Image: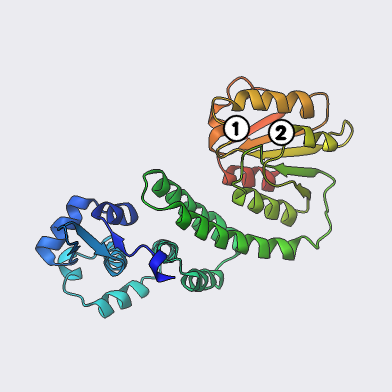
């Protein structure tokens, strides 16, 4: 298993994961000997996983007003002990996100689980998803875009987060709906990113709505089964990569004409590609959301 784990990192990788500029890292190396890069047979510098972990701890201390000269005087055990003692909400969040990053890079299920259980003792699942998982997923999305991680890392950590949502869903689905309104959740054709939709499913159930989650890659024609002229149904489409920004306005218009128009229903659209919706954004029965948290605000204030 170890052969599949990324153990060697470029200085650009360290910059991406820590937020510390490569120029600053090199200064810390030369002036304080905080990190010691190794070299390949062709004399190319690289850093070990241990160096990445150490840099994340250094960054945590530095961001909490520890002078770099003082940090340099700490041995590894002392550094870890001080990091563990930082208990404010902001500091705990930083340490937690660092642990999630390390778990992802090492394909370490045990570290992910231990970190998750630690914060679950202090807060609820909604807080974990909104304040930990969403920022973490946004960050790894950026890392993926700049080639800072392999898709296998993203798939690994996303699968673990999905497992946690599924556990919550199983506990919630046995409750009978308290509200007559129905939400139909779906992902358009060629859209497979369903993590955000799974979480919306959970939130809607906790509020007491009836939820029908139709999953990934659903053609518009399949939604006609749920078109009702008398009872209100809210359709929610999550568009991360499909339809493309160039096609999403046309897609939304087709959805409206075939499913929403002439009915008592609404269409909610969210995901990165909804930024491409222009002509249809002024239709009263269509709502466009920039994020999952905006949808949650709408659900809980309705």
Q: Which mark is residue 105?
A: none
Eyeballing the image, is 84 above or below 190?
below
Mark in the foreground, 2 or 1: 1
For the residue pair 281 and 54, the one nearer the viewer reads as 54
The spot of residue 243 in percent (x, y) is 60, 32
For the residue pair 128 and 297, the one nearer the viewer reads as 128
The spot of residue 60 in percent (x, y) is 31, 64
Is residue 74 among the parts visible in the rendering? yes
Among the two numbered marks 2 and 1 on one chain, the one whose residue lies closer to the N terminus: 1
Q: Residues within 10 Å of mark 1 (few under 14, many from 20)?
A: many
Residue 125 location, quadrant: bottom right
> Is disc 2 placed on a helix, strand or loop?
strand
The spot of residue 33 in percent (x, y) is 13, 67
The spot of residue 248 in percent (x, y) is 60, 28
Q: CA distance from mark 2 to mark 1?
A: 16 Å
Query: For the point 76% across and 43% down, which residue is it?
Result: 184
Residue annotated with mark 1: 243
Q: Please state if 100 lies on the left or on the right of 84 as rendered.
A: right
Image quarter where the C terminus lies is: top right
Residue annotated with mark 2: 267
Q: How many marks?
A: 2
Is residue 284 among the parts visible in the rendering? no
Q: Residues within 10 Å of mark 2 (few under 14, many from 20)?
A: many
Query: For the point 63% across and 43% down, which residue is it?
Result: 295
Q: Please state if 278 lies on the left or on the right of 184 as rendered.
A: left
Furthest toward the right, the residue is 230
Q: Please state if 141 lies on the left or on the right of 36 as rendered.
A: right
Eyeballing the image, is 29 above or below 186?
below
> Is disc 1 placed on a helix, strand or loop?
loop
Furthest toward the left, the residue is 31
């Amino acid at each position: 298993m170890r052969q599949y784990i990324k153990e060697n990192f470029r200085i650009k990788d360290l910059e991406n994961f820590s937020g510390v500029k490569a120029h600053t890292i090199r200064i810390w190396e030369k002036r304080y000997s905080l990190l010691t890069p190794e070299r390949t047979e062709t004399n190319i510098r690289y850093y070990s996983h241990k160096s990445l972990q150490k840099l994340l701890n250094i960054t945590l201390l530095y961001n909490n007003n520890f002078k770099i000269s003082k940090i340099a005087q700490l041995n590894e055990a002392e550094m870890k002990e001080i990091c563990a003692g930082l208990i404010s909400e902001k500091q705990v969040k930083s340490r937690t996100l660092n642990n999630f990053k390390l778990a992802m890079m090492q394909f370490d299920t045990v570290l992910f689980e231990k970190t998750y259980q630690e914060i679950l003792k202090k807060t609820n699942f909604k807080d974990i998803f909104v304040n930990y998982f969403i920022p973490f997923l946004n960050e790894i999305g950026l890392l993926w875009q700049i080639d800072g991680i392999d898709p296998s890392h993203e798939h690994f950590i996303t699968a673990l987060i999905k497992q946690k949502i599924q556990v919550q869903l199983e506990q919630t689905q046995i409750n009978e709906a308290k509200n007559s309104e129905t939400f139909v959740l779906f992902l358009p054709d060629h859209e497979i990113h369903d993590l955000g939709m799974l979480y919306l499913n959970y939130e809607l159930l906790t509020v007491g709505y009836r939820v029908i989650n139709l999953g990934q890659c659903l053609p518009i024609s399949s939604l006609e089964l749920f078109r009702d002229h008398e009872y209100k149904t809210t359709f929610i489409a999550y568009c991360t990569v499909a339809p493309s920004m160039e096609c999403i306005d046309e897609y939304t218009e087709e959805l409206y004409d075939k499913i929403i128009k002439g009915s008592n229903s609404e269409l909610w659209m969210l995901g990165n590609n909804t930024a491409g919706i222009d002509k249809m954004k002024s239709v009263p029965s269509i709502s466009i959301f920039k994020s999952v948290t905006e949808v949650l605000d709408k659900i809980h204030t309705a």
